[in-house]
């Protein structure tokens, strides 16, 4: 679950949450999309509005760790697995 999903689950619109936090609606949108970080001075208030503790908010903001598909990586790894020299 991300920030937007949590907000919606609590019945907030971006505008409604922005009003509670004292920021512009576009600021909430930028936080949800990851374009900007939540200001440190608003983190506690944001967490409270989303009924989270700060650590849970941090987890939502950071999201799950990115993983590469097994086939991703250097082409030399694939070439070497096929017995092809890349040098």
Image (cartoon, rainbow, N blue to C red):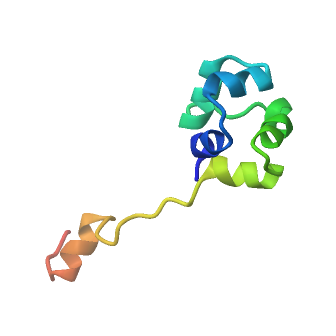
What is the x, y in percent for residue 87? 20, 69
Q: Nearer the viewer, residue 71 or 10?
A: 10
Above/below status of 27 relative to 68: above
Q: Nearer the viewer, residue 43 or 84?
A: 43
Residue 64: quarter of image: bottom right
| In-image side of 77 versus 60 (left or right) | left
Between residues 24 and 83, which one lies in front from this camera angle? 24
- Count the marks: how many? 0
Q: Residue at x 53, y 35 (%)?
A: 33
Q: Return the x and y of residue 68 as percentages of the image width and height.
A: 40, 64
As rendered, which of 24 and 65 lies closer to the eye? 24
State whether residue 75 is above or below residue 62.
Answer: below
User: x and y percent of residue 81 in the render?
Assistant: 22, 81
Figure check: 79 above or below 51: below
Residue 23: name its quadrant: top right
At 58% from the left and 45% from the top, the residue drawn is 5
Which residue lies most toward the top here?
24
Residue at 35% in and 67% down: 69
Image quadrant where residue 73 sits: bottom left
Q: Is there any visible trace of residue 46 in the rendered image?
A: yes
Q: Residue furthest front?
A: 11
Residue 34 visible to an observer of this rendering: no
Instruction: Tell me the residue at 76%/30% (across/down).
Output: 39
């Amino acid at each position: 679950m991300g920030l937007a999903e949590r907000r919606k689950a609590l019945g907030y619109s971006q505008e409604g949450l922005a009003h509670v936090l004292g920021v512009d609606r576009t600021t909430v949108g930028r936080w949800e999309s990851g374009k900007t970080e939540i200001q440190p001075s608003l983190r506690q208030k944001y967490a409270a509005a989303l009924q989270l503790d700060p650590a849970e908010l941090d987890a939502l903001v950071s999201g799950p760790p990115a993983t590469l598909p097994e086939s991703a990586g250097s082409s030399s790894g694939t070439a070497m697995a096929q017995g092809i020299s890349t040098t």
